[in-house]
Image (cartoon, grey):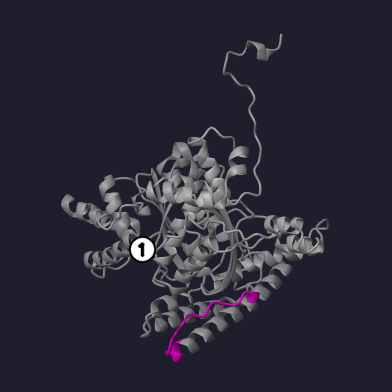
Amino acid sequence: MSRESFLPAGARNLTDVFAVHGADPEVLAYAMAKYSRSSLSMRESLSEISSQRAEQFLNTFYFQYGHRSIADLAHVAFAVERLSLLAAIVLVDEQRWDGQERSTRYQNFLKSGWYFPDFESDSASATLYCETIANLFGTYERTTAAVHNALRERVARPELMKPEAYERTLKARAFDVARYLLPLGTNTSLGQIVNARTLETQVSRLLSHPVAEVRDLGLKLRDAATGSAWNVNGEAGASFVEKLEAGSALAAEAADLLTREVRTAPTLVKYAEANQYAIKTKAELTQLAADLFGGLAIADAPVVDLVERTESLEVELAATLLYSVSHYSYRQIRDIVAALPAVRVAEIIDLGLQHRGKHDEVLRVFNAGAALRFDILMDIGGFRDMHRHRRCVQIMQDFTAEHGYETPMSGDAAGLAEAGMLVEFQTAVESAHAASARIAAGDSPEAAASALYLLPLATRVRCLFKMDFAEAQYISELRSGPPGHFSYRRVAWEMYLALERQHPTLAKYIRVTDFNEPIDLLKR
């Protein structure tokens, strides 16, 4: 007898697995959400659902009942092109984010162009801005060529390595050095695939940003999601329809199927607006930090500081809130907050929550309690690579020239001195910092924001990374490897050393690569 004959009534051993393609994101989200409200199969659901029915359902359950998990089911792909590096860093600052950006290692950014802010009537600042950008790009071009030539002299091509592969690899190593000169105003492009829930949060966050370009980017993302999407098969479909007999029922049916307008998320992000909770909280915390620290000097700090847990959760929350709106190290702030009366600490925490609306998620700083807290001070270029690690909580401080800049002196690449570019590099970066300070002191409403675009990627930025041991192990192993950029390889190595000092019995399980050991420059 067959196995099925022994199955009790109602038993079904007929698992069906199939991929779904061609459904609009919101329609697919509705179909998946129906599993909790209907016995229909996915095929049956998609066959009967229209975009209008999906919109009606989402308006009811997403907006009225607050079932936000439904938006997790609608994934949308975006191309975001010709945005500044500054805007790109802000855009990708999501914990639930998937995407790829143009690489400063494999592409020549001279071809990208750069963002020009609105200086209104301040022609002096506009002129200084253009001259500074031109100088940075000129130095970038000369540095790329000089380091590339120095590497050719130092590193011989292996007999089995093709000349084009040899040149491509050395050029990438040269870009590793030259990228320090790229200003935050440099244009880049990226692609992202996010669910509608993340998209709504992302748009709201962008609309709340003090920089005009970033706010405009938020509007464009919302418009792209709610408006007509670009159909990769649209031209081919239109051409096919034209070949059919004009006016025939078949032609009309084909046109409806192949060339119809598709809006990827017309419902789920249409109400995304600036987050007043985040805006008001940041303004009040900034003022509180200024009052509390009173012009205190920024204490010296290592590249990587693994801050041991000695404080209470309450002190951590208050310290992190103040860290997010200042330029001090976490250790320096933590020690100040730990000395405050408990009632004062509670007031700081309350300030981080008092403007929270009915549907607002708490600020990221409330993701507290992680066992490991790495306060990292590194160049912006290297930080962009570290920024990709989504399994940890990242509290990034605003860009500033207060921390100085990094000079690429690693043995991984021909040094700037060896390439004859050290003085020119330092002059270009310091001139950019000086120009940024002059523009920031201008009268236009966007003066402070416009000044940020002149900061080169060599400029240091501070970020607090909170994580568990598994993520620290992963970052240390991955980022310390020979194929990586020497900036984040150094940071990954310092993370390992900090772990080794505090948790020696655990550090032995990390397969780290010693930053101080020579590497094969031709290994990518």
Q: Quadrant of the C terminus?
A: bottom right
Looking at the rendering, which quadrant does residue 296 occupy?
bottom left
Residue extending farthest to the top is 1
Left or right: where does residue 128 sit relative to residue 446? right
Q: How many numbered marks appear?
A: 1
Report if residue 399 lies within the magenta region.
no
367 and 78: which one is in front? Answer: 78
Q: Amino acid at mark 1?
A: Asp
Say if 210 sits above or below 268 in the image: below
The residue singled out by tag 1 in the image is 300
Q: Quadrant of residue 176?
A: bottom right
Q: Is residue 264 left or right of residue 363?
A: right
Label the magenta part by its dominant secondary structure: loop
Residue 263 percent location from the top left of the image: 57, 59
The answer to which of 148 and 418 lies nearer the viewer is 148
Q: Is residue 213 above or below residue 265?
A: below
Q: Is residue 483 left or right of residue 271?
A: right
Q: Which residues are magenta?
A: 110-125
Q: Is residue 52 visible?
A: yes
Is 172 above or below relative to 116?
A: above
**Residue lying at 42% horizontally and 90% vertically, measured from the top left:** 121
* Residue 121 belongs to the span the image colors magenta: yes
Question: Looking at the picture, how far across and down is residue 514, in whole percent?
Answer: 56, 50
Q: Nearer the viewer, residue 252 or 183?
A: 252
- 447 left or right of 417? left
